[in-house]
Image (cartoon, coloured by chain):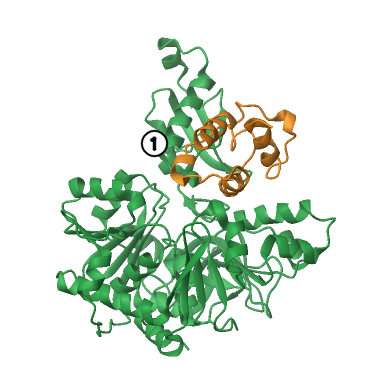
Chain colours: A green, B orange
Amino acid sequence: MVCNTIREILVQASERFGDQDAVRYKIGKDNIESKTYKQLRGDSESFSGALKTMDMQGKHVAIVGMTSYYWMVSYLGTVNSGSVAVPLDVALPAAELCELVERADVSVLVYDEIRADVAALAKKNCPKLQKIISMQKQEHENEILSMNRLLEESDGGFDAWANPEDLCTIMFTSGTTGKSKGVMLTQRNLAENATCLDMRIPSRTVILSVLPIHHAYCLSMDILKGISLGSIICINDSLMRVAKNIKLFGPDMILMVPMMIESFAKKLEDAAALPPELVKKEVFGDRLHTICSGGAYLNPEWITLFEKYGITILQGYGMTECAPVISTNLEWNRKPGSVGKLMPNCAAKVVDEELWVKGSSVMQGYYQMPEETKESLTEDGWLRTGDLGYVDEDGFIFLTGRKKNLIITKNGENVSPEEIENKLSKHRLIQEVLVRESEGAIEAEIFPDLEYAKKQEIADVKDALQTILDDYNKEVPAYKKVVKLNVREQEFEKTAARKIKRY
Amino acid sequence: MDILEKLKEIIVNYVEVEPEAISPQSRFMEDLGFTSFDFMSMLGEIEEEFDVEVNQQEAAGIRTVQEAVDYLNKLTA
C-alpha cells in the first residue's frame, strides 16, 4: 500500500507487527538484541515528544552516527514530529561536519559517541545549535543531553501527523562545483519512493543493512521500505564484519553497492572448483537469495555468476535528488545491461541524450541554493539527472554515460573532482591538477611547478607530490582518497576559457 | 609464523598478488590494489585470525603492510 508520510509507514507496521522484531543488532561480540515494532514506534514517539518539550519541534535536527537503533529512533522521531532530519556522513572530518550543521541551520545535533569530537567542536563553532544529544550517555551531563533520559522523560506517545508536502529530510550530496548540496525531500518524496513499488517481498523478510544510513539508498530501501514490509532489519556493526554478520543474522536479502558485489564475486571465482551449494552456504549462509544493487555501475557478468549460486542480483538506478530510486529490475521483469523499469511514481524523457525524470519523489530543490536548483529542476518539475541514457520500447532504462562532472565510485559515493582539485591546488608545488577516475580508483594527474621545486631545492618532485597526496588522504574518508598519481611533463591543454580540457 | 608472513597469507585472499611481491613498504590501495571494502573485509579476517578487536577508526589510518604489522603488534602485545 502506498504511504505518503513516514509516520503512516511506521504506524501501519506497528499495528500489523507490534510485538514482532523490527530491528536486530549486536551487543558485544556475538550476542543479538532486538527491538519490536511497538518499541520502535514508542521510542520514536518519545523522541518526537522530547523535541516538542524542548521547543525544538519543526527545527532542523542533524544526526551523526553509524547505523544503530537509536539512529533510527532519532530519524523517525524527528520527521514524524514535523521536524527536519539532516543525516550526515559519520566519516567526514569534524570541521566539515560542523560546516554542514551551520549551512543546514541545524538547531539540534544528535551524535554517536564515536564522534564525540564533532559534538565538542560544534559546541564552539556552531552558534545556531541549541541542543546536543548523545545517543549513548546514560545521564544528562553539562550541556550534553542523554537520549536515554530524554526518551524516559517524555514517554507518553506523540500523536500529530505531518503533512505529505512538508520538508522532512535534507541530505547532502556532492556538487559538481565542489560544494556539497543539501537535497530537500518531503514526506511524500521519501514515503512514496519506499512504498510505491510492490517488489513481492514477503513480510518478515530478514534484511542485513550494510550501507551507510546517511545515504538515501539505505535510508529509503533498507529502513523505510523494510519497515513498510514488516521486515526484520539487522544492523551490520562494521564493514569489517559483513561476512561474519551474514552468518550471524542469516539474512534473506541485502542491499549492496557494486564494490561489495565485486569483492564477493572474487571469492566465488576463487572457489569455482567447489560445489556451488557448499560455496553458497559458506559465503552467504543458508537463506540469502536476493541482493539489490545500486549507487554505481555493476558489471553484468556478476549477475550471471551469482545466479549459479542461487542468488538474484537486482540492479537499480537512482539519485538522492529522487529520494532516491528511479528504476529497478525485478526478479520477474529484468533485462541484462539495463538498470530496470521506471518506478510507478516516475516518468522519464530524454532531452539531448540526457535522462530527465519527473514524479512524486523528485526533490524540492537544494537547500538555500537557488542557482543550483534552477540548473537541476525545470520550471515544470523535470529533474535533469546529469546521466546520459535512453528508455527502450519496454520501458527499461539503459545508461550510456554521464554529463555531470562527478566521479561515481564503485561503492556508490559521488565525489566531486573539483573539490579535490581545489584542495590540492593550494600547494605551491602543484601548478595544475586534474582528478578523474581510473580503473575504479581516483587518480590525480599533476603538472608540478618546476620553478618552485627548483627554488625550494626539491630533488624528487614525484616523491614530494606523493607526500602532498598522503597528507590529503589522511584527512578524508576512504572514498575520497587519491590512490594514483600521474606526473605530467607538460601543462594541460586548455579550453578557450583557459580551463583544463577534461576529456 | 611471524605476523608479517601470516598477514601476507591473508592479503593474497583479497588481491591477485604473489606473497613474494608483498613487502613491508607495500601500500594496500596504491600498490596492492585493495578497494576500501576489501581492506575493511581483510581487517575483519584479521580480527578472527589473530583473535583481536580492531578499532575501525584507528585502522583507517593504516596505509602500508608495515603499519598493519605495527598495529597488530600493539594489539597482541
Residue A344 is situated, as x and y percent measured from the top left of the image, at 52, 82
Residue displayed at 35% across by 81% down: A7
The image quadrant of residue A38 is bottom left
Secondary element under disc 1, as helix, strand or loop, is helix
Looking at this view, is A174 or A86 the one in front?
A86
Q: Is residue A139 above or below residue B27?
A: below
Residue displayed at 73% across by 33% down: B19
Inspect the image, locate mark 1, and give the three-letter code of the amino acid beneath it.
Lys
Chain of residue at mark 1: A
Q: Is residue A148 above or below residue A176?
A: below
Q: Is residue B60 above or below residue B41?
A: above
Looking at this view, is A346 or A375 the one in front?
A346
The image quadrant of residue A104 is bottom left
Residue A287 is situated, as x and y percent measured from the top left of the image, at 66, 72
Q: Is residue A103 above or below residue A33?
A: above
Answer left or right for A108 relative to A277.
left
Looking at this view, is A110 or A341 the one in front?
A110
Q: Residue furthest front?
A: B77
Residue displayed at 57% across by 67% down: A249
Q: How many numbered markers are drawn? A: 1
Is residue A129 visible in the rendered structure shown here? yes
Residue A474 is situated, as x and y percent measured from the top left of the image, at 44, 36
User: Badge 1: few (under 14), some or many (20 or more) residues near its Cα, within 10 Å?
Assistant: few
Looking at this view, is A369 or A77 the one in front?
A77
Residue A315 is situated, as x and y percent measured from the top left of the image, at 62, 67
Residue that carries the numbered disc 1 in the rendered image = A423
